[in-house]
């Protein structure tokens, strides 16, 4: 029995609330007697839904207001889609827990249930992700990839209205909303490598809040944590931000950690894929090794200004 209370901060979308409710239920099961309450925090990314994410020009567009709420004491922990969190958290924040990861793949949802290879020439595909856009064009350079914003229901409605021939979404989000029945095609990692941390939740708190850290660490899933830490180490080593067309997927199995990375040019004409293997206990090494392999294969120009910092991030 654990008495006391914990306020979880979350964005207000249906998906964010579903994710936060899942975390709240896990906390109540781990700590019977603990009172868990949700606090909805609106972020800049939620308020300005008509602007492409790239236009914000900053990392953590869905994160800043939640971190402010942590600092001013309105909440004790914040529930994020881990792919929204920058690969390096600034002081005084800590990634307290990574629960068991959901399916990390992307999927295609199309009108007429056509898979990627059967979409007509010039089909309009909606995504707000440079990573998805680049990897789509690598497979189908004839497609017209157009930006799309809004929550899952909004995007599905735009598809239904005929504004797009297909859209790409994360499998995990659809599953958490009970909408995975709309999926036309799961895009396997060798075709579409997901975002760093995709499918995982990240629970953030203040590094100095020992009580919250103790409560939250009960939810940490060791293999999922190792996998996403390797992916985040790859992003850190390349100084890659949310708008970098970088995909990464690590899997822990048979006592090994296997990491795949994919970095593409914006038009999809050049794509660098690497695979490396390491130990689950040393995820940072696996990520840094993958970054070195990418740089040796010419990743620098695909990273733009970022390549000038490669040395310090791999030291």
Image (cartoon, helix red, strand yellow):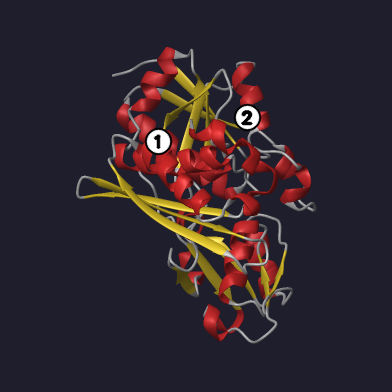
Residue 241 quadrant? top right
Tell which tag, 2 or 1, sits nearer the viewer: 1
Instruction: Give the residue displayed 68% in from the left and 39% down from the top.
Output: 61
Instruction: Give the residue displayed 68% in from the left and 30% down from the top.
Output: 65
Residue 126 quadrant? bottom right
The disc placed on residue 284 is 1
Tell me, yes or no, whether the two marked residues, 2 and 1, touch with CB atoms within 8 Å: no
Name the one closer to the observer, 72 or 139: 139
**x, y percent for residue 224:** 35, 42
Residue 112 quadrant? bottom right
In the rendered structure, the answer to whether residue 35 lies left or right of residue 89 reads: left
Instruction: Give the residue displayed 78% in from the left and 48% down from the top.
Output: 55
Name the one closer to the observer, 310 or 256: 310
Mark 2: which secondary structure? helix
Mark 1: which secondary structure? helix
Name the one closer to the observer, 172 or 88: 88
The disc placed on residue 66 is 2
Instruction: Residue 129: tell me if it is visible.
Output: no
């Amino acid at each position: 029995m654990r008495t006391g209370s914990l306020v979880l901060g979350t964005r207000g979308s249906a998906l964010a609330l579903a994710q936060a409710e899942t975390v709240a239920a896990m906390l109540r099961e781990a700590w019977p007697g603990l009172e868990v309450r949700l606090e909805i925090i609106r972020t800049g990314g939620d308020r300005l839904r008509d602007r492409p994410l790239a236009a914000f020009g900053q990392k953590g567009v869905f994160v800043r207001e939640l971190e402010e709420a942590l600092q001013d004491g309105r909440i004790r922990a914040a529930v994020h889609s881990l792919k929204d969190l920058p690969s390096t958290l600034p002081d005084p924040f800590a990634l307290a827990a990574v629960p068991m990861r959901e399916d990390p793949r992307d999927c295609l949802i199309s009108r007429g249930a056509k898979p990627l290879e059967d979409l007509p020439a010039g089909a309009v595909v909606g995504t707000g992700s440079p990573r998805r856009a680049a990897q789509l064009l690598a497979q189908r350079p004839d497609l017209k990839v157009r930006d799309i914003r809004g929550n899952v229901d909004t995007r599905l409605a735009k598809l239904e209205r005929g504004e797009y021939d297909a859209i790409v979404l994360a499998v995990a989000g659809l599953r958490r909303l009970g909408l995975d029945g709309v999926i036309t095609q799961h895009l396997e990692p060798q075709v579409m490598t997901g975002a760093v941390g995709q499918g995982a939740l990240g629970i953030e708190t203040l590094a100095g809040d020992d009580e919250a850290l103790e409560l939250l660490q009960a939810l940490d899933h060791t293999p999922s944590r190792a996998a996403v830490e390797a992916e985040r180490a790859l992003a850190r080593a390349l100084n890659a931000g949310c708008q970098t067309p970088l995909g990464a997927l690590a899997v822990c199995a048979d006592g090994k950690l296997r990491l795949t990375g994919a970095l593409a040019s914006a038009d999809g004409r050049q794509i660098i894929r690497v695979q490396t293997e390491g130990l689950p206990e040393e995820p940072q090494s696996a990520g840094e090794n993958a970054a070195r392999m990418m740089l040796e294969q010419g990743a620098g120009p695909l990273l733009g200004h970022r390549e000038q910092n490669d040395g310090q991030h791999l030291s």
